[in-house]
Structures are given as structure tokens and as C-alpha cells.
């Protein structure tokens, strides 16, 4: 199991606005006050972001139609998981967080300065997204050294892999408490600005877009592509 904290998160104002669920171009024309808040949030909030990731790679022992049995006797279950990780020789289980500091800062400001609090929340969303992307890129590069490929990530929370099932399976593979992450009985991670996912590593892994395995792909207004 590896703990990584050497990340360089390059977050700009547009990233923060997108992290708030907004279109940066439209906001710059219609609501410049939100752009100003995002700029201030970036300056004030970046020092409170502490990215860290925990990564564990486990050999796949057996595949079946509804589960992957791993070499340490743990398993990943569900048709979405087995389809997405078909052909994997190894599975990389990942948990990432930017810590609770920025989240606490946003909560303290919410009553007195909701505009800034919302912008700080967008900063947190952008930061944890970039963190996940950089972890995936690193795992992919490591796989290439062995002549393999890494799949796109799959996170709990989809209809065919709900959080209350998927999160405990990932947390059984990694000691998330080592980097300060816990889960509630319903599968919510604490701190909230945290993500978890699995990737398959093998000769020809699926490179589908993450949106294609998302249950909101037909209705999401922020779908990529």
C-alpha cells in the first residue's frame, strides 16, 4: 500500500466556478461578483488544501459474472464492477482527500459570507477532482512500464454499485484511516472532499469515458463530451 502526497494542483478561477456547477463564460458576463468571490477563495483557500492519496494494488484471483475475487480473499461485487474490470490482472483501490481544513473554513463562513463559502466549496470540488485525475494518471503510467493499461476509474454511487455496497468493499482493501478518511454506515466519506475508486490493470483495459458508466449520463448538464 502506497501513500502519495506529492501533488501539484493547478487550480484556476474557471475550475472553481465549474466546481460550483456553473458555466464560467456565462458567469463572467452575468455575475461578476461570483467571479470575484472565486478569485478571493483561490487566494485564501489554497493554503488549506492538503492532498493525499492511498493506493493499493491487489492481484485478481478469479472473475465471475457478478464478482471479482482478489488475492487477499476480498472481493468486488456487482455487474457494473465485473463488466468494467473485465480482463484485469490487478485492481488498484484508491482513496483520496484534500483534508477537512478547507471544508471547515467554508462551514465557518457560511452564515456571514455565503458567497465566499460557496466559492470555497467549489475550490474543494475542483481540488479533489484534480487530485483524482493525477492519481489515475500516475497509476496509468506505472501500468505502461509493465506493458499494461489501466482502466478508467469506477467510483461507488452508481445504481449498479451503490455507495453503501461499494464503499465498504474499497475500504476493506485500504486502511483509509491512515490518511484520516472514515465512512458512515450509508457510505458517505468524511471529510466530504474525498473520493474513492477502483481501476483495473491488464493488457487491454476499457478506456471508456467516466460519464459512460454514470447513472446520470442522460440527464447531467455537466456531462463531458
Image (tube, helix red, strand yellow):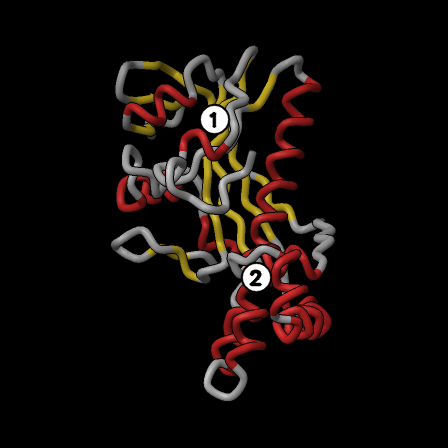
Between the residue at mark 1 and the residue at mark 2, the CA separation in whole angstroms equals 27 Å
Residue at image mark 1: 91
Q: Counting residues from the N terminus, which is met first, the one under dot 1 or under dot 2?
A: 1
71 vs 79, left or right, is right
Mark number displayed over residue 19:
none
54 vs 40, left or right, is left
Above/below status of 112 relative to 128: below
Most extreme residue toward the bottom is: 112
Numbered disc 1: secondary structure? strand
Front one among 30 and 62: 30
Looking at the figure, which quarter contains the C terminus? top right
52 vs 43, left or right, is left
Residue at image mark 2: 124
Q: How would you rate the neighbour count of disc 1 (Cα within 10 Å): few for under 14, some for 14-19, many for 20 or more?
A: many
Above/below status of 179 relative to 95: below
Q: Position of residue 201 (x, y in %)?
A: 53, 21
Amino acid at each position: 500500500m502506497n501513500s502519495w502526497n506529492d501533488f501539484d494542483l493547478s487550480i484556476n478561477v474557471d475550475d472553481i466556478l465549474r466546481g460550483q456547477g456553473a458555466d464560467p463564460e456565462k458567469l463572467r458576463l452575468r455575475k461578476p461578483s461570483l467571479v470575484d468571490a472565486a478569485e478571493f477563495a483561490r487566494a485564501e483557500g489554497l493554503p488549506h488544501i492538503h492532498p493525499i492519496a492511498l493506493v493499493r494494488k491487489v492481484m485478481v484471483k478469479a472473475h465471475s459474472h457478478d464478482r471479482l475475487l482478489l488475492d487477499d480473499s476480498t472481493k468486488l461485487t456487482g455487474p457494473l464492477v465485473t463488466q468494467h474490470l473485465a480482463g484485469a490482472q490487478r485492481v488498484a483501490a484508491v482513496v483520496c482527500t484534500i483534508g477537512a481544513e478547507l471544508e471547515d473554513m467554508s462551514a465557518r463562513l457560511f452564515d456571514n459570507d455565503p458567497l465566499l463559502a460557496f466559492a470555497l466549496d467549489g475550490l474543494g470540488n475542483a481540488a479533489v477532482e484534480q487530485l483524482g485525475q493525477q492519481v489515475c494518471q500516475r497509476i496509468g503510467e506505472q501500468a505502461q512500464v509493465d506493458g499494461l493499461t489501466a482502466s478508467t476509474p469506477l467510483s461507488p454511487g452508481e445504481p449498479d454499485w451503490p455507495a453503501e455496497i461499494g464503499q465498504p468493499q474499497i475500504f476493506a482493501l485500504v486502511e483509509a484511516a491512515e490518511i484520516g478518511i472514515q465512512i458512515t454506515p450509508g457510505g458517505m466519506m468524511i471529510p466530504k472532499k474525498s473520493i474513492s475508486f477502483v481501476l483495473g490493470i491488464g493488457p487491454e483495459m476499457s478506456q471508456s469515458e467516466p460519464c459512460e458508466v454514470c447513472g446520470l449520463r442522460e440527464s447531467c448538464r455537466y456531462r463531458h463530451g
